[in-house]
Image (tube, coloured by chain):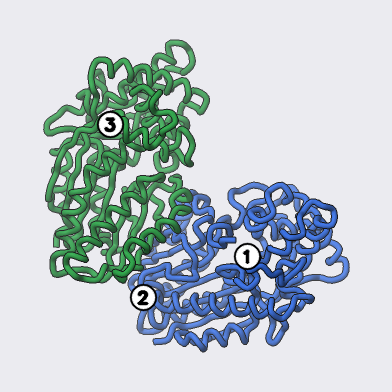
Chain colours: A green, B blue
Amino acid sequence: MEVMQVLHMNKGEGETSYAQNSTVQRNIMTLANSFIEEALAVLLCNNNYPESMGIADLGCSSGPNTLMLVSEVIGAIYAISRQMERPMPELRVSLNDLPGNDFNDIFVSLPAFYNKLKEEKLGSGFDQCFISGVPGSFYGRLFPRRSLHFVHSSSSLHWLSQVPPALDSKAGVTLNKGKIYISKTSPLSVLEAYLVQFQKDFSLFLRSRSEEMVSGGRMVLSFMGRRISEDPSNERSCHQWELLSHALMSMVSEGFVQEEKVDSFNAPYYAPCPEELESEIMKEGSFTVDCLKAFEVDWDGGSSSSHEAENCTKSETLTSGQRVAKTIRAVVESMLESHFGKEIMDELFRRYALLVDDYFSKTRPKYVNLVISITKKG
Amino acid sequence: MEVMQVLHMNKGEGETSYAQNSTVQRNIMTLANSFIEEALAVLLCNNNYPESMGIADLGCSSGPNTLMLVSEVIGAIYAISRQMERPMPELRVSLNDLPGNDFNDIFVSLPAFYNKLKEEKLGSGFDQCFISGVPGSFYGRLFPRRSLHFVHSSSSLHWLSQVPPALDSKAGVTLNKGKIYISKTSPLSVLEAYLVQFQKDFSLFLRSRSEEMVSGGRMVLSFMGRRISEDPSNERSCHQWELLSHALMSMVSEGFVQEEKVDSFNAPYYAPCPEELESEIMKEGSFTVDCLKAFEVDWDGGSSSSHEAENCTKSETLTSGQRVAKTIRAVVESMLESHFGKEIMDELFRRYALLVDDYFSKTRPKYVNLVISITKKG
């Protein structure tokens, strides 16, 4: 699987779209707001208050979350500049995602976004915000040298640049039989293959950003992870994949899916623990860690009221399992579809919803989400 | 009609798409190549050879022409840098069009484009080209202050930011009955309304670019126009619209279209003459004119061989009228559809093709295309 070509959130505005099913990611994004505000305050409060400020959101996706984040960042900069009685910097905002992302969806909502910005910030002399789309993998260079002051990424860095090559079915050996990610039954070599790929990717991510950011520039990154010293096969960091492999294997047992297909699929995903992050940051050497915190996030997006607001005609009739299935489907369908075929998707996620409902009857499952704030060294 | 919301070239890769029907625009683009090369040579040969170079294509559209232009510009810079034995500058390439443009179509072809670039320019140390999409109207600011060295625009600046307000049906008076652009029978007030809108738009265009470009920066602009001192209602600069209004009026006479609908539609388009351009450039004051030239371009894309290469299964069976109709449809359908409705499009362009064929039986029609190269003053 070519992750760069295949991975994208479900496009458009339809029932299975990411735009309609990204409440969990919105909640996760909100967790980082205080980190963003703190990072921007430090960035702007020193002697290097910039005339022009480069801002990037990496893995911006599409749907309402994309411009919500831009609003949050601009709002924070606006508040700081008012407090400091300084003119707003010129803002260069780059929205990055893989080339298959639905950039058209973001771009058509930009005129209304700019109008709102002008109305709300009118009288402050603020009319210079330039938003662009930058397609490409953040595991590599995306931006000109020393052009960025602030970088944000949410719900994206847990995606690897590729399936760990040792797990790739082309290698001929099936290491992770019947599973699609790290599982309790996975051999140690599977855990190692995933860790090595994460280390390689995250280090390339840091090296690339290091060239693109100014000294003192700040980065706030938020993604799925594990708590300190938690094992990669612990339930909290991989049970959503475990249940998805159960759904697939139930279809194998009824002859709807070939077993080899499941054996040869492994998610290009890794949920790191704080030590793994800090170790790569230290090795790469360009950044210092300001803050790192773990949060727990409900699988089904937390309070149902927030979900109802998004999808008000149907949500009252949806079970938690169905809501989780819709959230996961909007994210992973492009990958599963390219491997297993479009025709099994409805049935797969119907079964997945039932398995998740069963799991909810025993526990109240939560993801662990890490937020880390780091500074580019001088 | 909100031009910003409505105008876009036909999306995708289908039979009526711009991607499949933009041979004429490709030919027009090629006419400007020597202007581009000359402008870049002057830009890079002086003492200000930049480390990082900002390049923008305004009205980039989608389909094969978009990245062909980027290739041409990068190729020219590459050749100049080799000749000067200087390292390639870091290239920041911004592709601009209105928010409704099919940016997704461009972005999915970028990974292959980058790979080709790396292969062809390998060994020259050239691996830093950053392409982004910038949605918005070029009649207004799009880019940060003093960030651009070279600006290009082809087949775009003949589009106005809006229908001249005096012609807008909301004003209650129908000035341009039965016509959709300047026509031999249009009253002088129609010509004036179009000229005033062009002057307002082109002057805003220059003022916006003036803030965005560095001193000595170069702009090569190419668009539909008229020859020196040619009247705006001359056949060469508006007959494509005249025939389209005939096709519409033939549908009015048969009851398929309401006459008021035709009366209330006016194209947001203007084909200026060199004097009108130079007068606005002088008034605005930030640019000097290096070169201005008029070219004639066949309505049907010139040699049929180039067209066959693009659409090889069908082109041999298409008449000139059908080819012109497909070219024009790919450009104006979004606007016509929003005003007249989707359902009449097939029939309208069938009739248009017949009228164009009839016109071809009497003459060999050509557009006048102006290319102008200007420099930002120091």
Which residue is disc 3 drawn over? A303
Seen in the image, is B106 located left or right of residue A116? right
Crowding near pointer 2: few (<14 within 10 Å), some, many (20+)? some
- Residue picked out by circle 2: B146
Residue type at mark 3 is Ser
In x, y percent, where is residue B270?
64, 73
Q: Could you say which disc has been placed on residue B170 in the image? A: 1
Residue A179, visible in the rendered structure? yes
Cα separation between marks 2 and 3: 48 Å
Name the quadrant of the N terminus of chain A. top left
Q: How many labels sit on residues? A: 3
Name the front one of labels 2 and 3: 3
**Secondary structure under badge 2?**
loop
> Is B240 in front, or is B80?
B240
Disc nearest the viewer among 1 and 2: 1
**Mark 1 crowdedness (10 Å alpha carbons): few <14, some 14-19, many ≥20:** few
Q: Secondary structure at mark 1?
A: helix
| Residue type for callout 1 | Lys
Is B80 drawn above or below residue B307 in the view shown? below
In the rendered image, residues at marks 1 and 2 fall on the same chain:
yes
